[in-house]
Amino acid sequence: MYLYHYFEKERGPFLNLSDLSDDEAIQIQNDLSAQSQIYARRYANGQYIFERRIVEKRAYSMFVKKGGNPQRQIPYYGILSENELEEGYEWFIDCGVVKIPIEEFDKNTLSFTYGDSFPTFKPRRNEEPEYNLYLYDEIMSIIEKQGLPPIRTEDMSWWDNPTYIEAQVWSNETINKYRK
């Protein structure tokens, strides 16, 4: 099992807008949206950054409550899988990928969502989240019982139909070994 991190080659891997000030993050998001960057086609003018920070705070809080040991306030993101995902390459114009064996991570600094964390912790959702945040042993148990999510087809929405397991990495330790 591997953690795959997809990124825009020009910018490099393991960057997170939430590591920046609001002004810096909003400016970069607006620039990416204006350039029609594939993965950045999100709402501009600060709304995405605002909601992203709420999502990350909710994930952090749940991770701590479940006994996780975060070394960072916000995570790096990846996809937990046995193979690279074709759809990952659709997220960026000139996509790069970093592949890290899951064994290289301190399992206490990892959390997972069955699907993307945004629909899991969507800020405007009034009902309980449909998904949950899982620790390493929990997600491995789910994979053993259910398998990995189905590969996305044209008629599947990533929002309503999880097509991957998102990994949240709450530490710099292993990530720093793979920065280019």
Image (cartoon, rainbow, N blue to C red):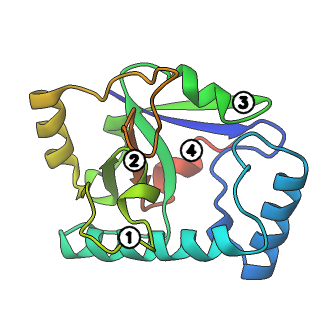
Marker disc for residue 95: 3
| Residue drawn at 47 percent across, 20 percent down | 153
The residue that mark 2 highlights is 167
Q: In the orientation shown, which residue stands out farthest toward the bottom? A: 22
Question: For numbered disc 3, what is the local secondary structure?
Answer: strand
Of the numbered discs 1 and 4, the one sitting upstream in the chain is 1
Of the numbered discs 3 and 4, the one sitting upstream in the chain is 3
Measuring from the top left, give residue 176's x and y in whole percent: 58, 51
Mark 3 closeness class: few <14, some 14–19, many ≥20 residues within 10 Å: some
Measuring from the top left, give residue 55's x and y in whole percent: 46, 69
Q: Amino acid at mark 3?
A: Cys
Mark 2 closeness class: few <14, some 14–19, many ≥20 residues within 10 Å: many
2 or 4: mark nearer the eye: 2
Of the numbered discs 2 and 1, the one sitting upstream in the chain is 1
The reply to whether the C-beta atoms of the residues labelled 2 and 3 are less than 8 Å apart is: no
The residue that mark 4 highlights is 177
Of the numbered discs 2 and 4, the one sitting upstream in the chain is 2
Q: Can you say which quadrant of the picture contains the C terminus?
A: top right
Q: Quadrant of residue 3?
A: top left
| Residue drawn at 72 percent across, 35 percent down | 92
Question: For numbered disc 2, what is the local secondary structure?
Answer: strand
